[in-house]
């Protein structure tokens, strides 16, 4: 092998090694930039989810507020306090409940709830009921 041939082969090997190292560097750099962008998007999504969670927690606290529930029921859903005739004790015969309800309603004096426009309730019942009465059931 002559001296120039040897020099050319070594020079070619050096150029190929340098080009390979440069291509490897570019590949690693582009992968690094790509991962940086993905990390940025993930952090933005995390911040957005944290904000959404915070807003939902505030809403959940507001929805647990009895005054807000009552206001929504009366305003949006058009519900009102049920009359004593519509309150039934679970497990008691219907006739006994109706008699007790009408007797108790007549005996009770106006209370704080009556001054607010709410009728007194002798038994535990849902506080609000739809203002639209259900259709009467016909006997077969």
Image (cartoon, grey):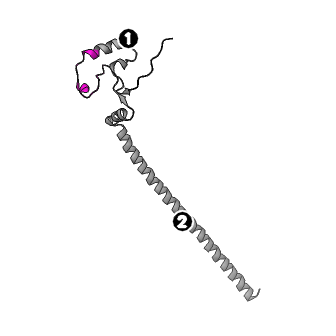
Q: Circle 2 — which element?
A: helix
Image: magenta residue range = 104-123
Q: Circle 1 — which element?
A: helix
Residue at horizontal 60 percent and vertical 68 percent from the top? 27
| Residue furthest right as drawn | 1
Residue 90: percent from the left, percent from the top?
39, 18
Tell me where residue 114 sits by quadrant.
Answer: top left
Q: Name the residue under label 1.
A: 95
Q: As displayed, is residue 107 above or below residue 52?
A: above
Residue 123: percent from the left, percent from the top?
32, 20
Mark 1 to mark 2: distance in Å?
78 Å
| Residue furthest bottom as drawn | 3
Q: In this view, does 73 lie to the left or right of 33?
A: left
Camera-nearest residue between 128 and 79: 79
- The label shown at residue 70 is none
Q: As displayed, is residue 36 above or below residue 71?
A: below
Residue at horizontal 55 percent and vertical 63 percent from the top? 34
Q: In which quarter of the image is the N terminus?
A: bottom right
Residue 118 in the magenta stretch? The answer is: yes
Residue at horizontal 39 percent and vertical 47 percent from the top? 55
Q: As displayed, is residue 59 above or below residue 6?
A: above
Residue 124: percent from the left, percent from the top?
33, 22
Q: Name the residue under label 2.
A: 33
Label total for image = 2
Q: Is residue 21 left or right of residue 94?
A: right
């Amino acid at each position: 092998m002559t001296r120039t041939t040897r020099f050319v082969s070594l020079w070619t090997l050096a150029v190929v090694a340098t080009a390979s190292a440069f291509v490897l560097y570019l590949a690693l750099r582009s992968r690094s930039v790509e991962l940086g962008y993905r990390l940025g998007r993930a952090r933005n999504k995390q911040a957005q989810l944290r904000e959404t969670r915070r807003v939902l927690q505030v809403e959940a606290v507001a929805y647990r507020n009895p005054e807000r529930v009552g206001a929504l029921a009366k305003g949006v859903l058009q519900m009102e306090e049920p009359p004593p005739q519509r309150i039934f004790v679970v497990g008691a015969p219907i006739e006994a409940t109706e008699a007790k309800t009408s007797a108790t309603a007549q005996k009770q004096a106006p209370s704080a709830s009556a001054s607010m426009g709410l009728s007194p309730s002798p038994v535990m019942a849902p506080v609000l009921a739809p203002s639209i009465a259900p259709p009467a059931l016909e006997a077969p």
